Image (cartoon, rainbow, N blue to C red):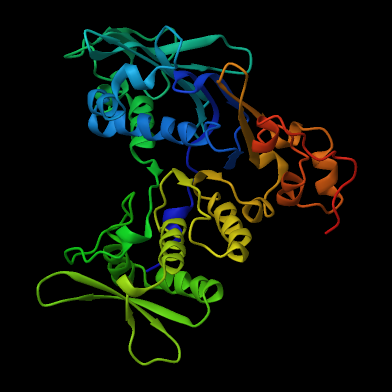
């Protein structure tokens, strides 16, 4: 089967993220986000919290605001300490042939229950046009403009929601008369925020092909079965890359057992019989799961991966970073890391460094904005080396503890 037909469309791209009052993210902005964005910083700097912003928004659309809110401990645990006001998430994203669209969501708590304080969608038609909100809601009441290209002259229709904790985009996004709202709903519900673990990948699920890897990776065998049946060329490509990364691995088999479960086996040379996945190394299963995700025939429009270096040999990490960058032709990736080896394959404008200020709130800066870093890289230095030698200054746990960073006087030699 030809996979190319599924990969011709460029997905929407998130260009901007602003967060207020979400745990340590008191007020933080990420401008000019790249197709591959990597977050770097000390433990507790807020990387996982940024990651969870995307997970929270996706879960609001998938399971509802109330469940996503309760799962995170409600306002007591979610709202930034010593702060007041709603939790706010704002993204700007670009669909291929449409103007940049801004989605704004503010959530607060009343009587122990979450409410949508404010939710709106807006865009600017033309280079010099003023912003136009074609969806605007407060606590379940509001209006929306229908049509493929909603404009200021179009009629606004009042469409009340059943309760104040419902997201208007999620509700109206089910009706074809609001195609731009439908597109945003489909975009966010399609996000893949990964919590892959080797232990989950060792399971023996019920047999049956499944198209998309679950967020924990517990259906890895089902996806291998699906690829073997529907996209054998793509699966062979995954095996080809896997053989380059893990010596002696030949292929991976998903075999249905008599009791209806699916058994994942890994064939390695020179042995005739494969080893069961539950006895395979954590690193082998993790790199296999990442490759299955990155080579998905119909990839998610957005992928989040947290600390991919866990269980992987350091020499595999620059190659994994390249695989991530190659995947951005068809998806957008957000990655958190502590690994200088992963950083060594990246460009300065792809990396954001995070740190906590004196008030305890997360701040961020693009590595390309740190004086001298871009020039060092242009002259052959690697980002991981620069980071380990203290050239980034902020985000260094030793600096945060009051210890001086090495003086960035000259670029390290390759």
Please state the horizontal and vertical placement of residue 151, each as a whole percent of the image: 44, 13
Residue 168 in view: yes
Q: Is residue 348 above or below residue 185?
A: below
- At 38% from the left edge and 48% from the top edge, which residue is drawn? 195
Quadrant of residue 197 within the rendered picture: bottom left
Quadrant of residue 30 within the rendered picture: top right
Q: Is residue 100 left or right of residue 292?
A: right
Q: Is residue 389 left or right of residue 41?
A: right
Farthest residue, direction left: 259
Q: Is residue 341 above or below residue 408?
A: below
Please state the horizontal and vertical placement of residue 208, each as a whole percent of the image: 19, 64
Q: Nearer the viewer, residue 148 or 300?
A: 300
Farthest residue, direction right: 409
- At 23% from the left edge and 23% from the top edge, which residue is drawn? 66
- At 20% from the left edge and 63% from the top edge, which residue is drawn? 205
The tally of labels here is 0
Q: Nearer the viewer, residue 162 or 54?
A: 54
Q: Is residue 11 left or right of residue 358?
A: left
The quarter of the picture where the C terminus appears is bottom right
The quarter of the picture where the N terminus appears is bottom left
Quadrant of residue 201 within the rendered picture: bottom left
Q: Is residue 77 left or right of residue 353?
A: left
Q: Is residue 40 above or below residue 19?
A: below
Please state the horizontal and vertical placement of residue 159, each as a whole percent of the image: 23, 11
Q: Nearer the viewer, residue 199 or 332?
A: 199
- At 59% from the left edge and 18% from the top edge, which residue is drawn? 126
Please state the horizontal and vertical placement of residue 322, each as a whole percent of the image: 61, 57
Residue 96 in view: no
């Amino acid at each position: 089967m030809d996979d190319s037909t599924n990969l011709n469309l460029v997905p929407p791209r998130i260009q901007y993220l602003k967060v207020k009052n979400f745990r340590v993210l008191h007020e933080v902005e990420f401008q000019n986000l790249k197709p591959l964005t990597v977050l770097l910083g000390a433990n507790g700097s807020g990387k996982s919290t940024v990651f969870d912003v995307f997970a929270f928004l996706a879960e609001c659309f998938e399971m509802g605001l109330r469940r996503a809110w309760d799962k995170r401990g409600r306002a007591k645990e979610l709202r930034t300490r010593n702060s007041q006001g709603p939790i706010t998430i704002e993204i700007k994203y670009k669909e291929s042939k449409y103007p940049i669209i801004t989605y704004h969501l503010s959530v607060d708590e009343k009587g122990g229950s979450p409410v949508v304080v404010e939710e709106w969608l807006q865009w600017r038609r033309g280079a010099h046009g003023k912003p136009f909100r074609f969806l605007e809601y407060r606590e379940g009441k509001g209006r929306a403009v229908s049509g493929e290209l909603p404009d200021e002259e179009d009629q606004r229709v009042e469409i009340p929601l059943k309760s104040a904790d419902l997201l208007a985009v999620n509700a109206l996004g089910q009706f074809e008369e609001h195609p731009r709202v439908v597109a945003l709903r489909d975009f966010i519900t399609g996000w893949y925020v990964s919590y892959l673990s080797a232990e989950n990948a060792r399971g023996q699920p019920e047999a049956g092909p499944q198209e998309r890897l679950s967020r924990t990776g517990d259906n890895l065998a089902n996806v291998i079965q699906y690829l073997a049946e529907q996209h054998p060329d793509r699966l062979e490509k995954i095996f080809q890359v896997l053989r380059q990364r893990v010596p002696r691995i030949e292929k991976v088999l998903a075999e249905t057992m008599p009791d209806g479960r699916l058994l994942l086996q890994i064939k390695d040379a020179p042995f005739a019989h494969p080893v069961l996945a539950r006895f395979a190394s954590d690193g082998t299963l993790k790199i296999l799961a990442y490759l299955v995700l990155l080579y998905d025939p119909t990839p998610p429009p957005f992928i989040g991966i947290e600390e991919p270096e866990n269980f992987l040999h350091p020499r595999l990490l620059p190659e994994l970073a390249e695989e991530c960058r190659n995947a951005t032709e068809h998806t957008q990736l957000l990655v958190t890391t502590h690994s200088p080896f992963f950083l060594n394959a990246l460009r300065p404008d792809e990396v954001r460094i995070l740190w906590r200020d004196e008030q305890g709130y997360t701040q961020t800066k693009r590595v390309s904005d740190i004086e001298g870093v871009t020039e060092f890289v242009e002259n052959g230095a690697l980002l991981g080396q620069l980071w380990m030698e203290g050239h980034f200054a902020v985000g260094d746990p030793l600096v945060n503890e009051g210890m001086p960073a090495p003086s960035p006087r000259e670029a390290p030699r390759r």
